[in-house]
Image: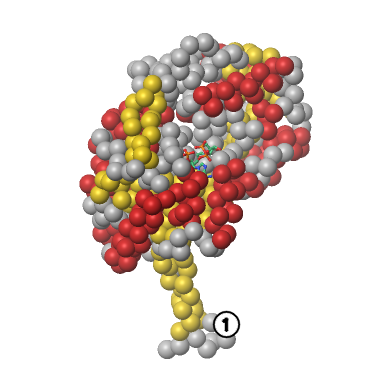
């Protein structure tokens, strides 16, 4: 497969290269071109050059290119899933789920591309018409994380291309291979040279900064940690670059006394264990009514303990290794800290010896309400459980965080479910559901979880500017 930079429709070498590791063994699986600032500016040049023709390309043609990319991804689902599993470590079942989800963004935005809309109204004075048209923002820098290397890329590339923008994708350096495979698919689908450029780099800070300070760049769409999001928001301020930020989460999972516990445990397994907990949407804190907490914890622990842990690429594995040493070390530290403060491991709770970045599925009970594990993004297969007594207390605990991406609520009382959904400060709520991600829905957070929405109709508006033309006729 290609391992060079993809700029202006060509595979170009870089001055340096870097290694990609297999999280199951820590061994090198590939060496990839390491883009620098000069390469980044060459990519901006290519994207800016391709912009006018791409934005003038009929929406139907742009739509058909995206549709073809969806079909190619679907045809190659097995090989793409294997690649994701290899470089990210996730179990093949999770990787297959990601490919289907990722491809769906191309299909959805193929359908959206032809629904360009504007408005025309008469001004209140009656003197003129107010005509509003939508135009592509222009050259976009897309920065993606390692946890969904395909889906986080297509969730940005799909709407950007549908809107008529051109892009430079800077993938996470832990998982550049999937991004390069996507470049091959897009080129084969008919994306013209320069419309999509892919720039793996170990010097993310420097290359992204160089692009954000080039006046031809008009937007940055970032998915990753809140910490890096803050840096990019500050850099974007220099040239007043349009920003979309999909940042960290700290999702509460609320189980009320009237919840259907079977369904709550099923939902908890999805909300917690999709991608082994390495998801911004992962349930991070379980708040369970005191009357059902012991039952819920014991059922969840039984299900978690039964999961098969192993190399992501091995058939039958349900939980792969975490992505790298830093991530597994962080999870281990948070669990040790909670146990030292009095929490009890109902299952798991200790990092195994041996190679690979494995952490066992873990359920913690008796977690102190001020424990670090409830404040930080765990990003691993650990479910800390805290009890509550009243609805007001549950909502207050759920909102006691600077994050606001997603929350999960389990209750059979629909009025309560909707009341609590409205009271929780989050961009998304799973009401009696452990999964919210859907290419047709607006995904995104409030508070320090982000700015803007991806997916759905809103996702395309993030790549369009409204132009108002005052007309007299
Ligand atoms: P990260 O460390 O913030 O990295 C994300 C991306 O930013 C990577 O491509 C990284 O490149 C790059 N980067 C790092 N430092 C940079 C800098 N100074 N300037 C420019 N780019 C920089 O996040 P991660 O560890 O990959 O991903 C996990 C985080 O993503 C979690 O917080 C998770 O919640 C969040 N996330 C959010 C969503 C959402 O939709 N809200 C979805 C998925 C993940 P390198 O790989 O080279 O460092």
| In-front residue for pair 175/159 | 175
Residue found at x 75% / y 28%: 369
Q: Decide if residue 3 is in sight here.
A: yes
Q: Decide if residue 126 is on the left or right side of residue 71.
A: right
Q: Nearer the viewer, residue 354 or 299?
A: 354
Residue at screen point 64% across, 39% down: 417
Coloring applied to the structure: secondary structure
Rendered location of residue 224, percent (x, y): 52, 41
Rendered-image quadrant of the C terminus: bottom left
Which quadrant of the structure image shows residue 363?
top right
For residue 235, above or below residue 80? below
Residue occupying image coordinates x 52% and y 89%: 127
Quarter in which the N terminus is drawn:
top left
Nearer to the camera, 261 or 457: 457
Q: Position of residue 107 (x, y in %)?
A: 33, 47
Relative placement, left or right, of 434 versus 50 is right
Residue on which disc 1 sits: 124
Residue 318: percent from the left, percent from the top? 43, 20
Question: Quick check: can you spot residue 421?
Answer: no
Residue plotted at (33% across, 32% down)? 31
Determine the image quadrant of residue 78. Answer: top left
Residue closest to the far front: 15
Q: Residues within 10 Å of mark 1 (few under 14, many from 20)?
A: few
- Residue 181 position in % (x across, y down): 30, 39
Above or below, 297 relative to 442: above
Q: Secondary structure at mark 1?
A: loop
């Amino acid at each position: 497969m290609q391992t060079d930079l993809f700029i202006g429709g060509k595979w170009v070498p870089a001055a340096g290269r870097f290694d990609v590791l297999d999280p199951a063994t820590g061994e090198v699986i590939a060496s990839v071109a390491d883009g620098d600032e000069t390469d980044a500016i060459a990519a901006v040049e290519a994207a800016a050059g391709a912009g006018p023709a791409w934005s003038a390309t009929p929406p139907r043609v742009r739509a058909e290119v995206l549709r073809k990319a969806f079909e190619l991804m679907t045809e190659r689902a097995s090989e793409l899933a294997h690649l994701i599993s290899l470089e990210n470590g996730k179990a093949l079942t999770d990787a297959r789920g990601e490919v289907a989800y990722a491809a769906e963004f191309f299909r959805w935005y193929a359908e959206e591309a032809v629904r360009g809309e504007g408005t025309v109204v008469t001004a209140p004075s009656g003197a003129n018409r107010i005509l509003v048209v939508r135009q592509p923002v222009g050259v976009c820098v897309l920065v993606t994380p390692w946890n969904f290397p395909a889906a986080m890329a297509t969730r940005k590339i799909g709407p950007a291309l549908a809107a008529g923008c051109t892009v430079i994708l800077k993938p996470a350096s832990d998982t550049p291979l999937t991004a390069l495979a996507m470049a091959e698919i897009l080129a084969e689908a008919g994306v013209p040279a320069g419309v999509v450029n892919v720039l793996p780099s170990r010097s993310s800070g420097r290359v992204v900064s160089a692009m954000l300070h080039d006046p031809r760049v008009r937007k940055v769409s970032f998915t990753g940690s809140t910490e890096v999001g803050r840096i990019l928001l500050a850099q974007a301020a220099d040239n007043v670059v349009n920003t979309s930020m999909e940042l960290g989460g700290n999702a509460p999972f609320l189980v009320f006394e009237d919840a259907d516990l079977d369904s709550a445990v099923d939902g908890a397994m999805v909300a917690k264990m999709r991608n082994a907990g390495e998801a911004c949407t992962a349930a991070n804190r379980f708040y369970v009514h005191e009357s059902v907490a012991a039952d819920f914890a014991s059922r969840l622990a039984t299900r978690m303990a039964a999961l098969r842990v192993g190399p992501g690429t091995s058939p039958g594995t349900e939980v792969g290794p975490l992505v790298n040493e830093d991530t597994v070390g962080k999870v281990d530290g948070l669990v040790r800290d909670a146990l030292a403060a009095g929490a009890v491991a109902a299952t798991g709770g200790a990092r195994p010896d041996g190679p690979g970045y494995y952490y066992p599925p873990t359920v913690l009970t008796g977690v102190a309400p001020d424990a670090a594990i409830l404040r930080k993004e765990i990003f691993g297969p650990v479910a800390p459980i805290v009890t509550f007594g009243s609805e007001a207390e549950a909502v207050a605990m759920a909102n006691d965080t600077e994050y606001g991406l997603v929350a999960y609520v389990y209750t059979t009382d629909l009025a309560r479910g909707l009341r609590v959904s409205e009271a929780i400060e989050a961009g998304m709520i799973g009401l009696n559901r452990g999964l919210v991600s859907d290419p047709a829905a607006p995904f995104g957070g409030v508070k320090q979880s982000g700015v803007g929405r991806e997916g759905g109709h809103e996702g395309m508006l993030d790549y369009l500017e409204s132009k108002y033309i005052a007309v007299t006729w």
